[in-house]
Image: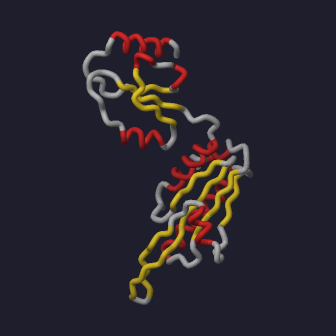
């Protein structure tokens, strides 16, 4: 398992609360078993990883919603009749007062990646900061870049090169600069590079 390195580094208790409705349709029962098998592997790699299924009692729905698990409607075919059923399928990962929520309906492929990414985000001591510089004569939209990188890093947008401090970012992205940099921008960028 490629995730074992991340899981073995967990130093404090990490708890995963699993929310699965009791009366899941047949195809979704397989998802529940897959999640359980994966989490049993994670628990084998670290004694600090534990998980449990939240009991389906009268408080299940309110607990799920309080933990950020969304109710979802699924189509059920039973005896040649089609109906819809509201279910809960998700998990809340808790570590040192921080938490992440994963919705699990429709997630078969990529679950290990999503889960490990969430665990890594929770267990990292310091989140690296990426600065996206604003320079040149044309401004570019960075929504997609922000969305993708923002899942794992802290993002600082529109950093101006003339007042750039090496202590404010771990990595600087210069994207699509058109035109010439001003002498202040050039000096700021060179200072950033020379200061590591």
> How many marks on residues?
0
Above or below, 89 relative to 47? below
Please report the residue visible at 49 percent of the width from the left and 75 percent of the height from the top.
Answer: 86
Near-viewer residue (134 or 114): 134
Please report the residue visible at 50 percent of the width from the left and 77 percent of the height from the top.
Answer: 26
Display coloring: secondary structure
Find residue 60 and report its horizontal and vertical position in percent: 62, 72
In the displayed structure image, the side of residue 84 where residue 68 appears, left or right: right
Please report the residue visible at 39 percent of the width from the left and 26 percent of the height from the top.
Answer: 133
Near-viewer residue (18 or 108): 18
In the displayed structure image, the side of residue 121 where residue 108 appears, left or right: left
Find residue 176 and report its horizontal and vertical position in percent: 30, 27
Q: Quadrant of residue 66?
A: bottom right
Q: Quadrant of residue 128?
A: top right
Above or below, 23 relative to 100? below
Find residue 118 and report its horizontal and vertical position in percent: 56, 48
Near-viewer residue (100 or 25): 100
Find residue 178 and report its horizontal and vertical position in percent: 26, 23
Please report the residue visible at 67 percent of the width from the left and 60 percent of the height from the top.
Answer: 51
The residue lying furthest to the bottom in this view is 79
Near-viewer residue (26 or 54): 54
In the displayed structure image, the side of residue 155 where residue 63 appears, left or right: right
């Amino acid at each position: 398992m490629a995730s074992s390195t991340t899981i073995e580094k967990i130093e404090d208790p990490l708890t995963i609360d699993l929310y699965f409705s009791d009366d899941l349709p047949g195809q979704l029962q397989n998802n529940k078993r897959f999640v359980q098998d994966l989490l049993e592997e994670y628990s084998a790699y670290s004694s600090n990883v534990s998980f449990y299924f939240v009991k389906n009692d009268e408080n299940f729905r309110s607990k799920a919603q309080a933990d950020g698990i969304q109710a979802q409607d699924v189509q059920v075919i039973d005896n040649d009749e089609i109906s819809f059923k509201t279910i809960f399928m998700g998990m809340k990962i808790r570590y040192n007062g921080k938490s992440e929520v994963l919705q699990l309906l429709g997630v078969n492929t990529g679950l290990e990646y999503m889960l490990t990414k969430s665990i890594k985000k929770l267990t990292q001591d310091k989140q690296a900061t990426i600065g996206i510089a604003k320079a040149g004569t044309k401004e570019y939209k960075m929504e997609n870049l922000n969305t993708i990188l923002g899942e794992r890093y802290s993002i600082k947008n529109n950093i101006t090169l003339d007042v750039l401090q090496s202590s404010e970012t771990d990595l600087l992205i210069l994207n699509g600069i058109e035109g010439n940099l001003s002498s202040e921008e050039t000096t700021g960028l060179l200072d950033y590079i020379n200061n590591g």
